[in-house]
Amino acid sequence: MKKVLLRVGSWLSGGNLVIRILAGIILGIILAELIPSAASLAGLLGVLFVHALKAVAPFLVLVLVASSIANQKSSQHTNIKPIVLLYLLGTFLAATVAVFMSFLFPVTLTLSNISHGVMPPSGILEVFNDLLLKMVDNPFNALVSANFIGILVWGVALGLSMKSASASTKDMLADISKAVSSIVRFIIQLAPFGIFGLVASTIEKAGLSALLGYSQLLVVLIGTMLIVALVVNPLLVYLHIRRNPYPLVFHCLKESGITAFFTRSSAANIPVNMQLCKRLNLHEDTYSVSIPLGANVNMGGAAVTITVLTLAAVHTLGVELNIFTAVLLSLVAAIAACGASGVAGGSLLLVPLACSLFGIDSSIAMQVVAVGFIIGVLQDSCETGLNSSTDVLFTAAACMAKEAKQRKIGDEAVHN
């Protein structure tokens, strides 16, 4: 038995990462069903994996952003503006698709008196206020509390301030950035063990029936994210590059989305995305900024979650919904989703904010949030996979569009 376990452990630590993660999921389910007492102990592996990612992700974002900006040469021009526009437009369109899907396949929930210890934002002004306060947070507190908005601002400020630093100082910052990225890649290679523990612990505590009980809600959520990933995003990319977008879409989903699905952290997936951009031969001065930025503001998956869960509450209570309110919900969900980064519970705790548009009581909205936590093992994974893969997709689309435009100008110059 000991030799078998050693062989399994050796195999999980080497080879194709996706296959090893799938094996970890299967082994976790088997362990939870056959030896429930051991499943709780295995859960420690999952806790260690998640805590390791949470520990390194804030510092990773800080050094990556600071290094990329500090090492940019004044003659180099980034292509950030169209990427940011794609991020914002994609997030809004994701919320709009979620509204349409929720009308087409209305979901009702069985709600009871479920309480939760964390208070959600009370209104859109509070979200903006929190965002502003996060932007000027103490840098050390931002790192400790995983305030990614504050970390992003300090990273930009530090990078701009160090543009005039000596070459050796910039090289040291770049070396630190590479070192932290290597640590993250090492942690991700341990994902099969972490996923094994998380699956075993979750199934042992809640059982497979916990997920099956909310199968319709999961189908609408995941189905909407698939539509965004396979229809909306490819359309946006096509409008930029004017050729078949699907080879690029599938490549990003495979290389970035699958890894993010299992790590459930856009920030921790930044090194994976950076390597993917490098393999796609994108402009380094562009993706070194756009990828960390996208991990904080490109939140199409979060917009889908906020919208679908809010409209599930609306349908459950029989609240009337008109076109104007639906558009307003899409806008609020998109804005709230951009502020979801660094919030405990992510997009789920912004559901009560959207529910307030329909006069839904906070106590009822928090019951919907509790449902979200139950299905979070799949919902959060799909959400992160969509968000992270889209960071690379939109960056690649903007870079390719710029290159095509430059080639066109060059061809015209030659002909003239």
Image (tube, grey):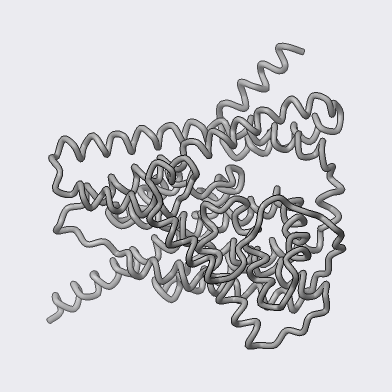
Q: Is residue 165 above or below residue 370?
A: above
- Horizontal side of residue 151 vs 231, given as left or right: left
Name the residue at 35% across, 32% down.
179
Tell me, yes or no, if residue 247 can be seen here: no
Residue 80 is situated, as x and y percent measured from the top left of the image, at 32, 64
Residue 356 is situated, as x and y percent measured from the top left of the image, at 67, 73
Q: How many marks?
A: 0
**Quadrant assignment, res 100:** bottom right
Name the residue at 55% across, 52% down.
257
Quadrant showing the C terminus = bottom left
Q: Is residue 38 above or below residue 161?
A: above
Tell me, yes or no, if residue 327 can be seen here: yes
Residue 324 is situated, as x and y percent measured from the top left of the image, at 63, 88
- Horizontal side of residue 338 vs 139, given as left or right: right
Name the residue at 23% across, 34% down.
172
Quadrant showing the N terminus = top right
Name the residue at 20% across, 46% down.
162
Residue 395 is situated, as x and y percent measured from the top left of the image, at 39, 61
In the foreground, 157 or 6: 157
Q: Residue furthest top?
A: 2
**Quadrant assignment, res 240:** bottom left
